[in-house]
Image (cartoon, rainbow, N blue to C red):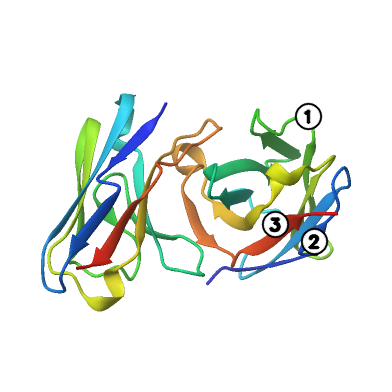
Amino acid sequence: QVQLQPSGPGLVKPSQTLSLTCAISGDSVSTHRGAWNWIRQSPSRGLEWLGRTFYRSKWYSDYAPSVKSRVTINADTSKNHFSLQLNSVTLEDTAVYYCARGDYGMNAGRFDPWGHGILVTVSS
Amino acid sequence: LVLTQSPGTLSLSPGERATLSCRASQTISGRYLAWYQQKPGQAPRLLIYEASTRATGIPDRFSGSGSGTDFTLTITRLEPEDFAVYYCQHYDDSPPWTFGQGTKVEIK
């Protein structure tokens, strides 16, 4: 049974970098049959997919156009976790952040399971 | 692709039938549509995928149907634990992926 455990600071100052990590148990971050996603939720934007990383003989990442210039998602195989970095945050980046496992192939965008949410507030 | 869910809020009593709609702005091929349930303070949970296949452990009072641009989630007899927000989502092999805005099923 795959379980995801996100962690990271709940408060980030404007213009700084938001950094979160998602620890994986029950699966490998290097699996060829899945991908590792970050999704956020806010009242103004609803559920918003941010990006993913996955391994298919080498590492790949995809990002949402809305954050592409500011986001990096990568994996650490030694710790079996993946991380999110969002640079130059503004108040609009205040949201609950989730990590989630995506499947592969045509099911790549199907998310199951999800980690619990982390509320990240951007405030000075 | 934009997903529009209706109604925004559904007020029903336990034991009643809930019918939630999700309409896509363009045809969804292969019926690659999922439904998620979200309870307060919790992450979304996958209920239905491929429009009508229940995820592991989901009770059979939940069913999905539809194709093309119109999809429906039906809860045949609402249990107290079913009062939550439900989201639809189109998925495939090509990001980005988007969610509907949600339908809240509340106790009448």
Pointer 1 and pointer 2 on the same chain: yes
Front label number (1 vs 3): 1
Disc 3 secondary structure class: loop
- Within 10 Å of the Cα at label 2, are there few (<14), some (14-19), or many (20+) other Cα atoms? some
Q: Residue furthest top?
A: B26
- Report x, y in % for residue A110: 46, 47
B27 or B77: nearer the viewer: B77
The quadrant the C terminus of chain B occupies is: bottom left
Q: Nearer the viewer, residue A37 or A18?
A: A18
Asked if one can make out residue A38 in the rendered structure from this viewpoint, the answer is yes
Q: How far apart in space, not on screen, are marks 1 and 3 (Cα)?
A: 24 Å
Q: What quarter of the picture does the N terminus of chain B occupy?
A: top left
Residue located 57% across and 55% down the image: A101
In which image quadrant can residue A92 be found?
A: top right
Asked if B90 appears above or below A113 in the picture, the reply is above
**Real-space CA distance between mark 2 and mark 3, rounded to the nearest whole angstrom:** 27 Å
B53 relative position to B16: left or right: right
Q: Earlier in the sequence, mark 1 or mark 3?
A: 3
In the image, taking residue B37 as reference, residue A61 lies left or right, namely right
Task: Identify the residue shown where x is 58% and y is 42%.
Answer: A49
Q: Which residue is mark 2?
A: A11
Q: Where is A12 relative to A86, above or below?
A: below
Which type of secondary structure does the marked residue at label 1 adopt? Answer: loop
Residue position marked by numbered label 3 in the rendering: A29
